[in-house]
Amino acid sequence: MSLEDLKEKLSKVVEPGDMVPRDYEKDGCLLEIKARADQVEAVAKAAREADCFLESITAVDFTNGPQIIYQFNSCTIVSRVLVRVQLSRGESVVSIGSIYDAALWYEREVFELFGIRFDNHPDLRRLLLPEDADFYPLLKDYGKVHAFRSTEEIYGE
Amino acid sequence: MGMIKDIVEGGWSLIAGMWVTIRRIYRPVVTVQYPRECLDMSPAYRGHIEFEQFPETGSHNCVACGTCMRFCPTNVIKVQGEKTHTHSEKRASLYFIDFSHCSLCGLCVVNCPTQTLKFSGEYELAHYSRWDGVIDLIQRLEESA
Amino acid sequence: MAAWQNLVNFLGPDLARIVVGVVGVLALVQVNALFLVWLERKVAAHIQLRIGPKEVGPFGILQSIVDGIKLVGKELITPRHADRKLFMLAPIAVFLPVLVSFVVIPFSERLLIRDMNVGVLLIFAFSTFNVLAVLVGGWASNNKYSLLGAVRAVAQNVAYEIPLLLAVLSVVMWSNSLQMSEIVASQSKVWHVFSMPVATLIFLICATAETNRAPFDIPEAESELVAGFHTEYSGMRFALFFLAEYSNMLIVSAVATTLFFGGWKSPPFLGFLPVPGLIWFFAKTYALIFVTIWVRWTFPRLRFDQLMNFCWKIMIPAALLHLVVYAGIIKIVR
Amino acid sequence: MANEFLEPITEQTFYLNMGPQHPSTHGVLRLFLKLDGEYIVEADPVIGYGHRGHEKMAESHLYEQFLPNSSRMDYLAGLIFNHGYVAAIEKMAGIEVPPRAEYIRVICAELNRISSHLLWFGTYVMDLGGFTPFLYSFDDRENILDILDRVSGSRLTYSYCRFGGVARDVDDEFITATHQFVERLRSRWDDYHNLVTKNVIFIHRAKDVGVINRELALRFGCTGPILRAAGVPYDVRKAEPYSVYSELDFEIPTGTKGDALDRYLVRVQEMEQSLHIIEQALERLPDGAIKAAVPHKVRPPRGDYYFAVESARGAVGFYIVSDGTSYPYRLKARVPSYGNLQVLTEVLPGTLVADTISILGSIDIVVPEVDR
């Protein structure tokens, strides 16, 4: 499966304007997709059909709400796709655990570290932290951090 | 027949394995009986830091600029300097490291502007109390001199 | 009064013999276990390019005595929900059959405690007792690892008992007696290891399995079941299990020596050497033990189902076939 | 039928807590197993006992200050993580690394990979009950540690790669010692194969055990030797060549079935390939500087960046969001063992307790790497 193939599959589920090509040499990924929270499942399905594997799910906390980042990559030809989902505070996302089993743990991790809930997740317990942890350590208002910024300050949009 | 072949081949593989181990019995041992004999440390070995003694001054060159303090990831270093008289250069009067938190990254050594820090070859660093990990580098330098 | 005296007269020499024998056996068992622990550590170390014990005594030979003293000094921990009585009983029960088995082993021509006419039977009857102790210990510990280990031990020992006995049966048929001294006598010309090598191999493999030694140490399987049936045992109770393991090694090696390697007899071509039978006996026994140790430190462990398959699909048919073939041979020869 | 007259058996299964303290969970991993006899019905790996919050630590540390943390995630392949982290920041900040430094990094990283595989080899066979190969492989591994100790000053957590180069130059003694080691390890293969690879007991314990096929590996995001054992020639060193790997010639060993034996063979062949890489790199080792001039505090431009390297266990990725200061805004480490461990939930059910050990060992996890 080539990158073009993946692009074609993805263009069916997101608007072409939301697909931003990235410079691999500079950024380490080839394509960035700005998705809405309700598009995540469709994007994951498209990636799965294009024979990609889920590299990681992570999140970044900004003043204007956390951002979830999904990374898909293919094991035949490098085609790293970054799916960026901007959430408002307290908003939840649909779990893609039914499409990628790897997502089950990544989502649990994001949940416990950022407090982002994943709908339809079969087992949303804490993974790395103790079961009774009532804090979300990677949020920028927890503990010692260097800065707390908005997305504009970093991506300049 | 296949089964008998499997048994014979399997048995042969076991004997080959036993041949490998029995030959080792008379080979020289490779372990070092540590407290009885010690190996030389490699020249690059990174122990905790200590002061370099410069032959020109016979002492360290620490000017207590605090670069090492700021670069230390775990805030291991505490340094204080004083001026002996108004126009003299600042000199370190207190230099403590808490080795028990040190990760031996060497950022202090790399970033030291006067190159007065170096790694020691110390490797027997187990202590009974966590306070034994606190080392006074100035005192250490004086004792070694 | 007369009856009492009669009893003493009747038992007298025999009683003295038994008392001295038991004391001697006890001493032998202890010293042997201490020596074997040291030997095992030393052999393992040299196979692995290490030195092994070296600090206590010359070549570290006193290391196991020091270890023993340490174990005696340790607290005996009983898990909270364990079956206390059985938990205490198991280490004793595992040690008892060891003592009994030594009664019939002929160490040399004269040196045997009791020359029973059912010697072989007695040894194998009591060696089966061993597994009961393991089961009791594993069950009473109230620990899942111990239980799994005990269950494995039972299945394994029951299975391997069969080919073991079948292999011994060939020897018994050949020498026409269950008496240990008779079996030794029957090997004056040819040792059974040369006349029936397959039976010897079967016996040695099964004996390794019976004593739970690697590669058949699945009841203890330290990387799977922590320590198997003796996970919860500490101090002297653990030491007794340990002692029993090494004594069992000595017993099976001694029995193998008696049954297959000519017992206390010297090798035929070395008959001119003025070496007493006792030395020959122990030399052979410890040579066999060395092989067991060597095997242990070479191979990985079998999986449980593979172990059972190996027994039921290879060992038992082979032993049965061997028995039938030898029955025919004996019929023809005699 | 007859069953109607029997007492209904409500519970046939029981739970077994394998770990956090267990001889073969390699660290503080806990496997929560539901057993039916010795057969596993359900498996739930419980992780997080060694969670140190490296990602949170990064947010309050300078880029330089996070450097020692990188090799403490995976203490067995510390140098590769080190390399990955440093290379990520260099790419971000546009730092050119002198070629000599790149070659030294590759040599040391490959040595580190071999040392990790050797340790795995020993512990895997030890999990299966064979104790002796463990000490033989440690004997060889000790040579690597000595070599790396000579250049980096540390035996496990190297912190050897620095922004713009490496911390210390290598000397002739390093080169001869590495050559000697390559020869020594090659001469040891025969013994290893006779002792382990051809051993009938070992083959029985590893063959057809814990089959992870391509489909399963992709669903769980497994990378590294697990994916390669399933027949997928995916190696970050080939797929997205970093450092000087594009100039070096090596093959990606693959398996066919994806069972424990395939994973074993893939790793053993990988060690041989690493030796091959080391030989080439030593031959081409250029002269020159070992460190580019870099500012005391690196300030990568704003934006996000992802960089992947191949560790001994699979694809390691560093996802870094920079806000233009000398502190990372967010640093995420994608670790290979995470996906590799998670696949146990699917692979373990239906196997025996003894197989659990074999599968867990063949997957080669490093728990501090999973926990981070």
Image (spheres, helix red, strand yellow):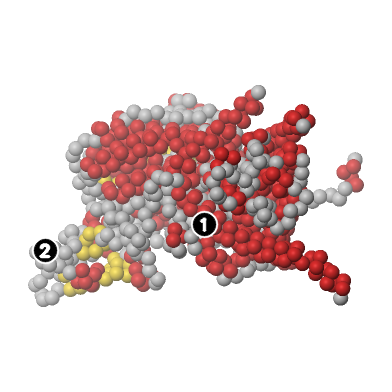
Give the labeled residue for mark 2. B55
Kindly report the distance in space between the C-alpha atoms of the residues bearing marks 1 and 2: 56 Å
Disc sitting over residue D195 in the figure: none
**Residue B36 to residue D23: above or below:** below
Q: Is residue C66 left or right of residue D44?
A: left
Q: Position of residue C195 (x, y in %)?
A: 66, 34
Question: What's the residue at 71%, 63% (across, down)?
Answer: C17
Residue D245, by quadrant, is top left
Characterize the local packing of mark 2: few (<14), some (14-19) or many (20 or more) Cα atoms within 10 angstroms: few
Q: Which of label 1 and label 2 is nearer to you? A: 1
How many numbered markers are drawn? 2
What amino acid is found at the position of numbered circle 2 in the picture?
Answer: Pro
Position in image of residue A113 (x %, y %): 50, 54
Task: Rate crowding at label 1 as few (under 14), some (14 to 19) or many (20 or more) other CA atoms within 10 Å.
Answer: many
Q: Is residue C317 visible?
A: no
Tell me which amino acid carries mark 1.
Trp
